[in-house]
Image: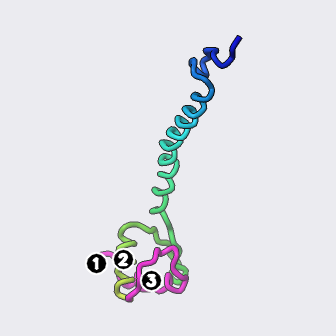
Amino acid sequence: MDRSRSRGWYNAGMPKTKFMPRLWTATLIGASFLVPMAVAPLTLRADDRKYHDADHNDDHSWNKKEDKSYRRWEKENHRKHVDFGKTKEEDQKAYWAWRHGHPDDRQ
């Protein structure tokens, strides 16, 4: 019996030389649909950061209002924008000190 021509469920009559590339193509396409679903929770979690202000002994949730205030502080202090999580500890302390003197209602 010629195995290259056998009709099993795995090759539906195709020779192995055509079946494997189609299998890899289907696998890659399937993976391309799964990757965004796996990455989405990471991007959603990025906005849920919390920071502790040791000088005032309080916690701050990083949200759109906090980001707006931080960008205002950067502008007032003539600084280039740097993600708050990547700034130096002394700059973070300076921001929190400024922030306690500038509540949201005065923006």
- The magenta region covers 78-105
Q: Which residue is drawn at 54% across and 82% down?
A: 88
Q: What element carries label 2?
A: helix
Q: Which amino acid does label 2 sit on?
A: Ser
Q: Could you tell me if the residues under marks 2 and 1 are in contact, i.e. CB atoms within 8 Å? A: yes
Residue 69's disc is 2
Whichever of callouts 2 and 1 sits on the residue coming sooner in the sequence is 2
The prevailing secondary structure element of the residues shown in magenta is helix
SS assignment at label 1: loop
Residue placed at 52% from the left, 35% from the top? Answer: 26
- Across and down, in percent, residue 15 comes to 60, 23
| Amino acid type at image mark 3 | Tyr
Is 12 on the left-hand or right-hand side of 60?
Answer: right
Q: In this view, does 18 lie above or below 85?
A: above
CA separation in Å, label 2 and label 3: 9 Å
Distance from disc 2 to disc 1, alpha carbons, whole Å, reads 8 Å
Could you say where residue 84 lies in the image, as x and y percent from the top left? 47, 75
